[in-house]
Image (spheres, grey):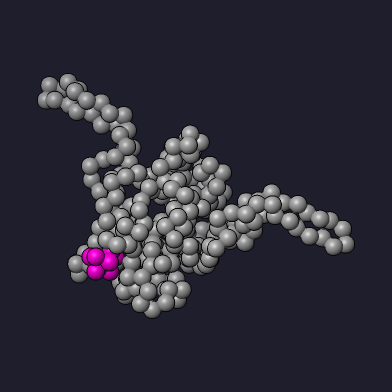
């Protein structure tokens, strides 16, 4: 299945990094977070990617256009017959990457609508955001989607705890203090969605519409939105602290999303 990744937002809450680069290009362990997301999908056999570009999309184009230059040791033969020798092979040799311009100011629904021409009629596809990592079984989510028979299946995840939780009695005594627990009890949309081609019928040709607003509301009203519950690791990268946390996990060889 083709994998559509939303890569066009400005990431204003991570301004320390996104002032200079698009959010999906913020590095985790020396490689863009986008690369990590793609590696998760590729591990499960999904290696045809469609990247919805917007803000500073030229940097994403440059990364993939010069992928071997960016990821390999290189020997240059100079002189009248110049040549280039790349020393390293990698697992990405069979990836197919479509770089689609979807507008710098577009909202998410319009970005997805713009890439409809790259998805053959009737073909389901995978869809996610370019800023979240998860130890998720992609193929299990696809099976759940097919079993439900609905237009869209989102991965329902527990939000990472950003605030300490305390248990307080009526007299003010604190009985529990848990500094930033990994998970909270509620579920949120963690991305990593599975979509029927019918999803495009729910997307208006309007750059101001967000996928998470009117289209999702319509899917709910029509009984066409399904959830695949993912109880394991999920972590967005919305802030500088979350970027540091993901880098610490990678540096310590404790990255739960590294399934490849």
Name above or below for residue 26 compared with residue 180: below
Question: Going 51% across and 36% down the picture, which residue do you hit?
Answer: 251
- Using the image as rendered, state which of residue 8 and residue 25 is in the foreground: 25
> From the viewer's perspective, is 97 left or right of 166?
right
Residue 40 is left or right of residue 70, and the answer is left
In the image, residue 175 above or below residue 32: above
Across and down, in percent, residue 1 comes to 41, 67
Q: Residue at x 36, y 57 (%)?
A: 138
Which contiguous range is marked in magenta? 145-152
Q: Nearer the viewer, residue 97 or 187?
A: 97
Q: Quadrant of the rendered structure where residue 116 is?
A: bottom left
Q: Is residue 45 left or right of residue 91?
A: left
Instruction: Confirm whether residue 10 shows in the render.
Output: no
Percent coordinates x, y for residue 216 in the rendering: 27, 63
Identity of the residue furthest to the right in this view: 80
- Residue 162 lies in the magenta stretch: no
Q: Which residue: 11% across, 25% down?
A: 170
| Quarter occupied by residue 68 | bottom right
- Where is residue 225? Give x, y as percent: 24, 64
In this picture, is 70 found above or below 47?
above
- Residue 7 in view in this figure: yes
Between 186 and 49, the residue placed more toward the observer is 49
Task: Identify the residue at image location x=48%, y=37%.
Answer: 253
């Amino acid at each position: 299945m083709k994998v559509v990744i939303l890569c066009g937002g400005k990431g204003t809450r991570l301004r320390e990094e996104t002032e200079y680069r698009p959010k999906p290009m913020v590095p985790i362990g020396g490689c863009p977070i986008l690369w990590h997301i793609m590696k998760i999908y590729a591990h499960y056999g999904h290696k045809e990617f469609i990247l919805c570009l917007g803000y500073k999309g030229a940097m994403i184009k440059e990364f993939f256009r010069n992928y071997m230059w960016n990821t390999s040791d290189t020997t240059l033969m100079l002189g009248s017959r110049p040549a280039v020798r790349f020393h390293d092979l990698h697992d990405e040799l069979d990836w197919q990457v479509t770089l689609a311009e979807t507008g710098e100011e577009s909202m998410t629904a319009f970005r997805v609508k713009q890439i409809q021409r790259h998805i053959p009629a009737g073909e389901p596809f995978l869809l996610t955001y370019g800023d979240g990592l998860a130890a998720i079984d992609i193929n299990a989510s696809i099976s759940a989607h097919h079993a439900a028979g609905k237009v869209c299946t989102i991965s329902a995840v527990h939000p990472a705890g950003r605030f300490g939780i305390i248990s307080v009695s009526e007299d003010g005594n604190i009985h529990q203090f848990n500094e930033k627990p990994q998970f909270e009890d509620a579920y949120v949309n963690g991305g990593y969605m599975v979509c029927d081609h019918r999803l495009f019928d729910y997307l208006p040709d309007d750059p101001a519409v967000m996928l998470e607003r009117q289209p999702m509301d319509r899917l709910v009203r029509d009984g066409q939105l399904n959830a695949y519950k993912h109880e394991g690791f999920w972590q967005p990268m919305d802030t500088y602290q979350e970027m540091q946390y993901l880098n610490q996990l990678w540096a310590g060889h404790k990255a739960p999303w590294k399934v490849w």
